[in-house]
Amino acid sequence: MNLPVRLLPEAQEEFDRAADWYAGYGADLARDFVARVGAVVRRIAASPRIHAVVYRDVRKSVVPRFPFVVLYREEASEVIVVSVFHTSRDPSEWQSRLN
């Protein structure tokens, strides 16, 4: 059973900004990024507990080929994506959203 997935507005903004950035280097690269993040999100929806907890109740899934992770938490009826996070950034950026 797949849980519905909801991106926090900040996570959606990060995702959109990254996709736009990759589009500047080619439509194929942007499509690949979007597809790989989509595959990660679908895998999370199907098995939200597959990844380890990295902070409080937040789990992390690595986006293949790209320096991004999807950070999410499982709730009773949905999965909430907290961040689509570039791995070079300071983790306190997304952690502050949880306080």
Image (cartoon, rainbow, N blue to C red):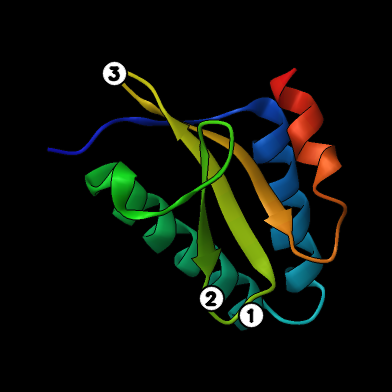
Image depth: mark 3 or mark 1 in front: 3
Query: Quadrant of the rendered structure where residue 94 is?
Result: top right
Query: Quadrant of the rendered structure where residue 45 is?
Result: top left
3D distance between C-alphas at marks 2 and 3:
29 Å
Looking at the image, residue 13 lies above or below residue 64: above
- Residues at marks 2 and 1 touching, judged by CB atoms closer than 8 Å: yes
On the image, the x and y values in percent for residue 6 come to 47, 29
3D distance between C-alphas at marks 3 and 1:
33 Å
On the image, the x and y values in percent for residue 85 come to 71, 53
Disc marking residue 32:
2
Horizontal arrangement in the rendering, residue 83 relative to residue 14 (left or right): left
Q: Nearer the viewer, residue 54 or 87?
A: 54
Q: Residues within 10 Å of mark 2 (few under 14, many from 20)?
A: some
Q: Nearer the viewer, residue 72 or 54?
A: 54
Residue that carries the numbered disc 1 in the rendered image: 29
**What's the residue type where badge 3 is placed?**
Ser
On the image, the x and y values in percent for residue 11 come to 67, 38
* Location of the C terminus (image quadrant): top right
**What's the residue type where badge 1 is placed?**
Leu
Image point (32%, 43%), residue name: 48
Image point (81%, 28%), residue name: 96
